Image (cartoon, rainbow, N blue to C red):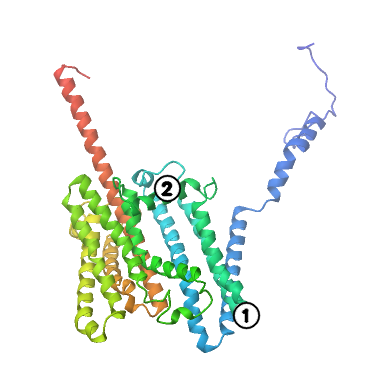
Amino acid sequence: MFGGHVTVPVNSPHLRKSGSRQLFSDLETSEMKGAGSTPLAAAAMLPSPVLLWRLKVMLFFLWGFSCCKIGWDSVMRMSLDLRDLFLYEAFLYYNPLLLVTAAVWFWGANLWVFAQANVNYSKIFDLDQNHLTHKEIWRCATWMTIIVPTSMTSYLYLYSHGEVSWAASQPVLLYTAVAIILIFPFDIFYLSSRFFLLKTLWRIVFPFQAIAFADFFVADILTSMSKVFSDLERSVCRMVHKQVATIAWFEADSVCGSHAVAIPIVLVLPYIFRLFQCLRQYKDTKEKTSLLNALKYSTAVPVIFLSALKYHVFPESWTNFYRPLWLISGVVNSLYSFYWDVTRDWDLSCFTRIFKFSKPHIVSQIIYGQKWVYLWVIGSNLILRCTWTYKLSAHLRHNHLTVFAITTLEIFRRFQWAFFRVENEWNKMNSKQNIQMGDISGEEEKLLSVNNHNV
């Protein structure tokens, strides 16, 4: 029964000729129709990833063109005497979030370069396994790029068409949504990453514990965004006092005016936080370098408050006494900060690695591979450090577009600084690990030699 000869008809569907297409039985065909054909057909109906990506890019550009067109038409509907004032007010509300969006884009680029250079940034920052990758950072930045200009366009359109109350609600709703998403306690919107950020900010404001690398790294980034916090304070102040969609804030006696005492206080807070971190670090390590670093951040205080004094002293006193002090303090802070970036944060050893290049860094060797990269980053860092005085000095902040451009360049400078700062920390960690491994191997050799063991 199992081993006998079976006669199969010539016209059997189970036979096929040599070189012809294989035939399937009715049972196999029905199985293929019932099980395998549906997923294959569904997969064939789905568009390719390249087509989806092109569609997203087209929709993004269509959205950008629509926002620009609607915003421009809305501004052109206003009278000339109101147009500049209104644009300045709209800029005040959306400038902070636009700059934060740029910082998120830059941070995603930082993570991408770290990944390409095999720099274990999760180990440096002590991140868990659920930390965000550069793709997820860019996804967040993309949504921010869409939401913030959309709200701004709605604000311009509603105000120009007479819907003042609806226009005033746009920045309020946007800021409220950002705050809710940031502190949302449920496991959505990257809960672990949001919790890590909030915990780090708490440790920065209250440095009652040992300072970790992530603490002072984020605190340094906050110093580059002090102008953002200043505009954020004025925006929130106007929302609290119900001054949105009005021009009352241009008056000198306005509660949230540009001459308020709160502006220099908010500007100086990131530097005060960083100064306290340095003092805490000196308390823990007794390293004099921490005191010199604290002195660097203390030089920012005179620049900020001397500039703010222009609106509270007589013009003769400002011209003859306070302005020279402000210029001197600005030069001292800029040069001191530049020196610290190059020799301490990047550990370039007084430019010897620039010209001799005897010990190329990881990023320069793997990613850049060119000496001009270091020359560029040092030169641009010096120039952008000198613009620090402009963006933090209250009496120079009249042209909001110029201030916006300089603040964006400062965030870009910090984005460059992060490459070499993290690279330097990674080199230090590897050096310590190599030293520890050398000590362990040395102890093993001593034990083997004492016991006369041969391996």
State whether residue 134 is above or below residue 400: above
Where is residue 399? Give x, y as percent: 39, 80
Residue 29 in sight from this viewpoint = yes
Image x and y of residue 267, in percent: 34, 67
Q: Amino acid at mark 2?
A: Phe
Residue 92 drawn at (x, y percent):
46, 73
Which residue is under mark 2? 196
Q: Nearer the viewer, residue 337 or 417?
A: 337
- Figure quadrant of residue 26: top right
- The dot on residue 124 is none
* Element class at badge 2: helix
> How far apart are labels 2 and 1 at the CA level?
43 Å
Q: Residue at x 49, y 56 (%)?
A: 138
Give the residue at x 28% y 75%: 307
| SS for dot 1 | loop
Q: Position of residue 219 (x, y in %)?
A: 33, 56
Report the disc number at residue 162.
Answer: 1
